[in-house]
Image (cartoon, coloured by chain):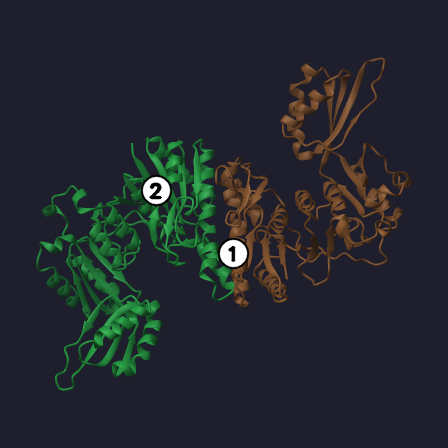
Chain colours: A brown, B green
Amino acid sequence: MGIVVQKYGGSSVADATGIKRVAQRIVNTRKQGHDVVVVVSAMGDTTDELRDLAEQVTPLPPPRELDMLLTAGERMSMALVAMAIAQLGHKAQSFTGSQAGVITDSVHGKAKIIDISPGRIEQAIADGAIAIVAGFQGVSQDTKDVTTLGRGASDTTAVALAAALGADVCEIYTDVAGVFTADPRIVPAARKLDRVSTEEMLEMAASGAKILHLRCVEYARRYDVPIHVRTSFDTVEGTWILPDHRSGENPMEQAIIAGVAHDRSEAKITVVGVPDKVGEAARIFETLASSEVNIDMVVQNVSAAATGLTDISFTLPREDGQSAMGALARIQDEVGYDKLLYDDQIGKVSLIGAGMRSHPGITAKFFSALASAGVNIGMISTSEIRISVIVDEGQIDTAVQATHTAFDLDATEVEAVVYGGTGR
Amino acid sequence: MGIVVQKYGGSSVADATGIKRVAQRIVNTRKQGHDVVVVVSAMGDTTDELRDLAEQVTPLPPPRELDMLLTAGERMSMALVAMAIAQLGHKAQSFTGSQAGVITDSVHGKAKIIDISPGRIEQAIADGAIAIVAGFQGVSQDTKDVTTLGRGASDTTAVALAAALGADVCEIYTDVAGVFTADPRIVPAARKLDRVSTEEMLEMAASGAKILHLRCVEYARRYDVPIHVRTSFDTVEGTWILPDHRSGENPMEQAIIAGVAHDRSEAKITVVGVPDKVGEAARIFETLASSEVNIDMVVQNVSAAATGLTDISFTLPREDGQSAMGALARIQDEVGYDKLLYDDQIGKVSLIGAGMRSHPGITAKFFSALASAGVNIGMISTSEIRISVIVDEGQIDTAVQATHTAFDLDATEVEAVVYGGTGR
């Protein structure tokens, strides 16, 4: 039997009861003959509580020290999970990100994994132990300082470890039963997907589906790691996220549409009256890039011949809004644009499905569903397997519901159950 | 200017307010031109809370995992102290025991420091930063696992670091103003000592004075580190603990008696009817030693010629009582003793003073004071600078008060103030 990597989120290990339940589940997997490596998040709201504590001391904590503080969270949960497993008569050893060989760059707060050197984990497995690893954290290659990988990055730790260890599967345990065709809070008739391709999941994560972190799915695709998203509160199967070549299905039989995703975290900036000259747009986006602003969708209006001016609109995370506006204001004279407009009353609705490639007419059907529901489309962007539109924030729910129904995704009975608290 | 090591206990860093006050104090020391290295304990009752959490999961946590859990405590406080210093505009970096180079043996829960390799601390100092180090923790030389040094061992971390760095002084900040001639809760007229010799402090710590951990004072004596015990709640000078050769005083002018200590943590075991043969006592104490029981005082009665039997009494920590009784019961047939008596209703009262060496008559005066107060003396043990007696537990306070008065230690007004909470 091979290695199974299991990742338990904060809501699964929120208290002693949860920790004991998780330990039992881990031991059951071990008894089935698997070598088990477990990645844990901090208990419940611990990470937020530690952030609050830092805020009481200073509004601007040095990132190195904030990482040192936050990594105390997983240290507690991993030790407690190891204890609970020992109590059940099995051998367990906990490891910090550093001990587990999670080597990162030095960008505190959102470090990227450079390499995994899981020598101690492999030794623990060889010794017959279950290895418990702190999610979310690593050690910087250059400074040997403790780093964190950013919010929700325990999933990434799990997939990266699964890849490094050549695990059979990476099981991500959460408080919902799997990946759904839409957010069940908006579409009560959303259906649980049994399978979804890594590519589709990547588009869903990038389009606002919160079930898995984008980087985690990118890692899974790059290193060909099968992910099984499921709940720790029940034994039902969840959703398998598999590369196309592993899905074992005839592409012709594949569902055309995987689901509808939405995102409330974006804002739109319009640069009005940009001289329609070579290099102006490049200057604008270079400026944004050097301010570490991530751009999502971009639209450039057709230049009005009479004025020689054009408008450039783009969307970006709301949290980057202020620094983007500031950066653009500083180059107004240089670029010579007229003014800036900022709008954060927007949302993005995306339709995702690998079947789009072979089924024409999806876009028409999508837009027609939105029109029938009275939803105005702002910007549009597409990939091979995704169509996204920007709509008014107040119309997001209507747009998601209408689309879900139009593509026959509605289940006949309610499938979605949220098990634990709200934390990850 | 040289290096100053400062150690702040849990009551000094119990919350954000305490952390900011401590940060200000550290920065003030830095501004005086010193290089500052700070050792911190976990905030307030954090360590006990973590122990409770472990107990909720299992009654017998594996020691390696318990150490992993508990070390989260100092991780939080050290990061927060570093943040608070940064907020005051000074550079600070926090370091775990492992990062600070605190190398220990592998005895989880009470590891001993083998070596200190403070390369990263020295680098931080060279970079102009204040180094904040986690007390109480280290890393095992053999297994590279995280270890803890036992309750109250942050003091030991501080003194060991001061020795390794060649610091000018190790300041131990606590919630009382210094070392007193007796426990002010028993003797309200107890006086704060301005100076006490390392040897005297060693005897006081071994005799139950809780202000400093025994191992910390041993370390200070071995590596010739001056300690300054003081409070973080006030700017008054506390008590200097100095090796004799540093005290700068004429030994003739030295106070004869440093203080009166007491200890409520011991029990007495009597082995009744031991055959008075060569090797029997050795057999008993070998058995106790191999059960890791630490013996304090020992008395062997004069053998009754008629029976050829003798009684052996000894004191030991109450927490070792059960394992000692068990170990002795197992060798009853082999040794052929009659029976075992166990008494934990005892206490130890000790008179300590380097002046005893040159002043005869101290013992007589001590015993006479106890007799006048109606205190019965059980066992007696002495060193060059200490006399200890075992008394009934209910007579400890009376014995301490009578002794304090008899040796003219009473102050004319109350000097003792307890500043913070009760934690260390």
Q: Which mark is residue B32?
A: none
Above or below: residue A248 compared with residue A288: below
Above or below: residue B410 compared with residue B83: below
Q: Position of residue A414 (x, y in %)?
A: 81, 58
Of labels 2 and 1, the one closer to you? 1
SS for callout 2: strand
Whether residue B408 sits left or right of residue B160 in the image: it is left
Whether residue A416 sits left or right of residue B84 in the image: it is right
Q: Is residue A80 visible?
A: no
Q: Position of residue B245 (x, y in %)?
A: 16, 44
Whether residue A164 sits left or right of residue B85 in the image: it is right
Alpha carbon distance from label 2 to label 1: 39 Å
Check chain identity for marks 2 and 1: say if they share one: no
Q: Which residue is mark 2?
A: B6
Above or below: residue A139 compared with residue B326: above
Residue located 48% across and 63% down the image: B61
Q: Position of residue A226 (x, y in %)?
A: 70, 52
Instruction: Residue lying at the far bottom in this picture: please name it.
Output: B306
Residue located 25% across and 76% down the image: B270
Q: Amino acid at mark 2?
A: Gln
Q: Which residue is mark 1?
A: A123
Q: Amino acid at mark 1?
A: Gln
Instruction: Residue lying at the far top in this picture: please name it.
Output: A306
SS for callout 1: helix
Q: Position of residue B20 (x, y in %)?
A: 44, 39
Q: Quarter of the image holding residue B205?
A: bottom left
